[in-house]
Image (cartoon, rainbow, N blue to C red):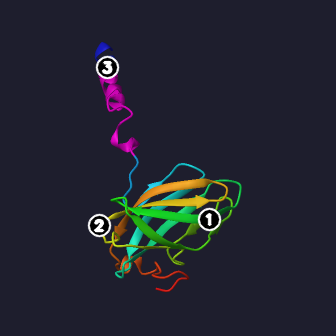
Amino acid sequence: MAATLAATALALAGCTATGVGAQTNQQYQPGVGANLRTGQVQLYNALAVDNGDGTATLSTVVLNTTEETQKLDSVTATGADGTEVGVESAPAIIGPGDTFNTGPAATVVFTGDSLEAGDFVNVTLTFDNAGEVFIEAPVVARTTMYADVARTPGGSS
């Protein structure tokens, strides 16, 4: 009886020995893009696709977690080195609980010398009801994987 009790105690101890930092408790992000999983407006797989002409298109899924419509009012950006990056953006309206993919319509296009694959761009999106959302997005090379990401505002590939 004592041996069975000791064996059971040892077996159960293994279940808690890894603690709350166990690998299964860590967020896993397999994609190249950056995620912002907190706040009223969340961003998923945010990245800038290098268009090869000194511009890059922001591709991210925007999730509105509020019960109000959110309108993208403005976008500002800087390169990883702090240099200003030009931005051309179109308004986007995201309904309550809805998502919006910025890539196919090229809702946000960056212009600047610091927009080559391997770099990062610091992006601030300002929404009318949720305020500012900041993310550091990697710049990636344009490949067939990003064929649906438009090169110019309005959706031209």
Q: Residue at x 49, y 66 (%)?
A: 60
Query: How many numbered marks have been drawn onto this rendered protein structure?
Result: 3
Label 2 amino acid?
A: Gly
Label 2 – label 3 distance at C-alpha: 57 Å
Closest to the camera, between mark 2 and mark 1, is: 1
- The residue that label 3 is drawn on is 4
Label drawn at residue 8: none
Give whichever of 69, 19 is nearer the camera.
Answer: 69
Give the quadrant of the N terminus: top left
Give the percent coordinates (x, y) of residue 127.
Answer: 62, 59
Alpha carbon separation for disc pair 1 and 3: 66 Å
Task: Give the label, 1 or 3, closer to the camera.
Answer: 1
Residue 142 lies, with reference to residue 14, above or below; the image says below
On the image, numbered disc 2 is attached to which residue?
A: 118
Residue type of the residue flagged with mark 3: Thr
Q: Which residues are magenta?
A: 7-26
Lower sequence index among marks 2 and 1: 1
Q: Does 139 sit above or below residue 131?
A: below
Nearer the observer, 41 or 144:
41
Residue 152 position within the rendered picture, expressed as x and y whole percent measured from the top left? 48, 82
- Quadrant of residue 46 in the image? bottom left
**Pointer 2: residues within 10 angstroms few (<14), some, or many (20+)?**
few
Residue ID for mark 1:
73
Amino acid identity at mark 1: Asp
Q: Secondary structure at mark 3?
A: helix
